[in-house]
Image (spheres, rainbow, N blue to C red):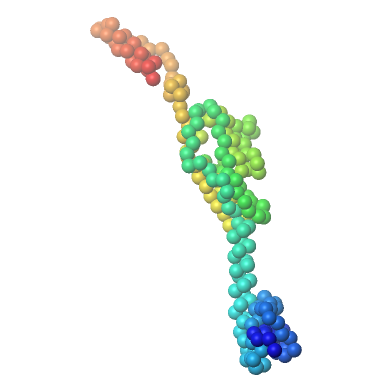
Amino acid sequence: MEKNRWRYTFSSSTFTTNQTLKSVQKKKNCDYHYNERSDKKTASKMCDTMAYTSGPVLYHQREVATEELLRPKIVTPLPLQSSVKVGSEFKLLCLLTGYPTIEINWYLNGDLLVETEDGRIRFDNHQRLLVIRDLKPSDAGSITFHATNKYGEVTCSSHLQVLMTKREKFAHSRYGNYSLNSSNSPKPIRRLLHALNRMKSF
């Protein structure tokens, strides 16, 4: 007779003397390990114990593994920082995996970004790509990517710096007519011309 032969029982916990196997048997998410020298009473008790402990544990492990695979996971993260000139086109791409359908949102300084009618702000590639045309100083700040489904969520952030050119530094300047009244003329005129020359040097 071969050694280390194994027996198993069914859900009725009845020890089956004529069933022998060399490997471990699984029935109803339960592992049954019984040496042929075990008596019926001991085998039945062991089966009941293992069915109570091993079954739920194995099911929980499979459930955790499934959630780990299906929850959103970033594959290509956003750059930590981007510096782009004002008036340029800016793009941010964040690739990720996950199932089922993932809901994606973009935020600028905590405010939700939405597509504009003129297309200045739009999303491509199922919202994984953010495109902003004609960058403005108000577009600068922290941009956050947020993805979620029923198994979890993930976020990724990037800082956008909008570079101003020399001309745009005075974009909010105002022009008007000025008159100077002074008995020390022409000194005030010289001072005004000196100030204008300094502004042109920026």
Q: Is residue 4 left or right of residue 162?
A: right
Q: Is residue 74 left or right of residue 6?
A: left
Residue 10 image point, x, y percent: 72, 84
Q: Is residue 107 above or below residue 15?
A: above
Q: Is residue 181 visible?
A: no
Query: Looking at the rendering, which quadrant does residue 184 occupy?
Result: top left
Residue 154 image point, x, y percent: 55, 52
Residue closest to the eye, 174 or 52: 52
Residue closest to the eye, 50 or 188: 50
Residue 111 image point, x, y percent: 53, 43
Q: Which residue is rendered at x = 72% and y = 89% of the image? A: 16
Q: Is residue 178 above or below residue 129?
A: above
Residue closest to the eye, 141 or 29: 29
Residue closest to the eye, 108 or 151: 151
Query: Looking at the rendering, which quadrant does residue 129 occupy?
Result: top right
Q: Which residue is rendered at x = 60% and y = 70% of the image? A: 60
